Image (cartoon, rainbow, N blue to C red):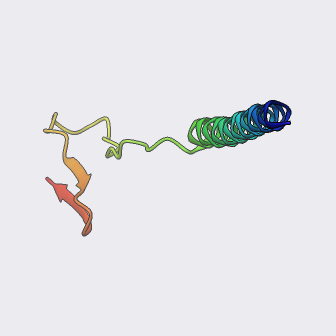
């Protein structure tokens, strides 16, 4: 009687361990799928974002050549260095 009970308890323990492994593996695959969808969405959003354009000044044809002004944004406002 003792060996039959040990056999059933061992089988129940193995079954529980296999079920826990399958649950953990499926949870890991679900998280992997969510992470891949977010990563692909981020790549598509970055590709569709507008690219920044360099600001330049239009020069007229009759003037002498001048140094091109430098224009940049330091985060507090646009700076124009003539």
Left or right: 18 as drawn, with respect to 72: right
55 or 27, nearer to the observer: 27
Looking at the image, which residue is at 13% across and 38% down?
Answer: 67
**How many marks overall?**
0
Return the x and y of residue 49 as percentages of the image width and height.
57, 44
Nearer-the-camera pick, 65 or 27: 27
Q: Residue 20 placed where, x, y %?
A: 72, 40
Splitting the image into 4 quarters, where does residue 27 fall? top right
Front one among 54 and 46: 46
Q: Tell me the quadrant of the picture where the N terminus can be found.
A: top right
User: Horizontal and vertical percent for residue 35?
Assistant: 63, 40
Residue 55 position (above or below residue 26): below
Q: Residue furthest bottom?
A: 76
Name which residue lies at 26% across and 67% down: 77
Image quarter for residue 79? bottom left
Identify which residue, 38 or 81, lies in the foreground.
38
Residue 10 placement (x, y as % from top left): 75, 32
Look at 77% across and 35% down and name the residue there: 6
Left or right: where 42 falls relative to 61: right
């Amino acid at each position: 009687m003792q060996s039959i009970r040990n056999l059933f308890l061992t089988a129940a323990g193995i079954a529980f361990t296999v079920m826990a492994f399958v649950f953990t593996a499926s949870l890991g695959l679900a998280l992997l799928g969510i992470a891949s969808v977010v990563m692909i969405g981020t790549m598509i959003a970055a590709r569709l974002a507008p690219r920044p354009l360099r600001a330049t000044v239009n020069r007229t044809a009759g003037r002498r050549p001048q140094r091109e002004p430098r224009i940049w944004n330091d985060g507090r406002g646009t700076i124009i260095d003539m």
